Image: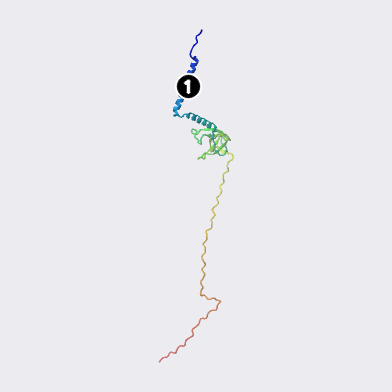
Amino acid sequence: MPRRQSGPSPVMVVLVGAFLVFGGYFVWSGLLDFLDDQGNITAQATREAFSTSTAQSSTSTPTLFAYVTHTPLPPCMEFTVSVNNAKLRECPQLDNIECPHREIVPYGTELCIYDFVPGSDEWYIVELNPGGAFRDIVYVNIEVVEAIDPTPTPSSTSTPLPTISPTPSATPGPTNIPSPSDTPDPASPPTPTPTPAPSSTAPFRTA
């Protein structure tokens, strides 16, 4: 008759040992968290709730993108090359070392020119990509191109001279009225002047 073995089975021993190891680990981790939170047992739940609300708010708020706007450019003026070959340069200079040419265009090539280079009256700003989404700017000397539809030069108009206003004349003073004179009026008769009568003189006698 075989003898029955007493005691737990090896499988049960392994399972109990595993439970003890994992249980001890979780108990130790909880104790450390409790000490870190200074005895506040709701700290972990508060942290989880805050992280959940933050994640929801971050996913629900759409991200706004600001699109880049370009400064509008002046209208394109049509020019044509008036020499055999014209050099389009990287900068408005004739120095081939500091300012090499980008391209050489033949006679009759139409160019889109914006305006003069600021501060210079010898170089034009040329756009090589007038209808594109990006700008491709070069420079050309004014001596090698001419306008297809030149703008009429304003005529010199004579400025009218200022009108001379007449100066005020001196106002004449009051007229002197002559005072009555002693000249007799010829229409009135003369007044007779009384003539004294001769007096009788006594005769002179001598003794």
The residue that appears at 45% across and 27% down in the rendered structure is: 34
Q: Is any part of residue 81 visible from this angle?
A: no
- The crowding category of the residue bearing disc 1, from other C-alpha atoms within 10 Å (few below 14, some 14 to 19, many at least 20), is few
Residue 110, position as x, y percentages in the image: 58, 36
Q: Nearer the viewer, residue 114 or 31?
A: 31
- Residue 151 figure quarter: top right
Identify the residue at image location x=46%, y=23%: 27
Measuring from the top left, give residue 111's x and y in whole percent.
57, 36
Q: Residue at the location (50% across, 16% down)?
A: 12
Q: What kind of element bears circle 1?
A: helix
Pick the residue in front: 105 or 25: 25
Residue 170 or 27: which is nearer the viewer?
27
Identify whether 204 is placed above or below 16: below
Is residue 34 in sight in this rendering? yes
Q: Name the residue under label 1.
A: 23
Front residue (pair 186, 45) = 45
> On screen, 174 above or below 162?
below
Figure disc tally: 1
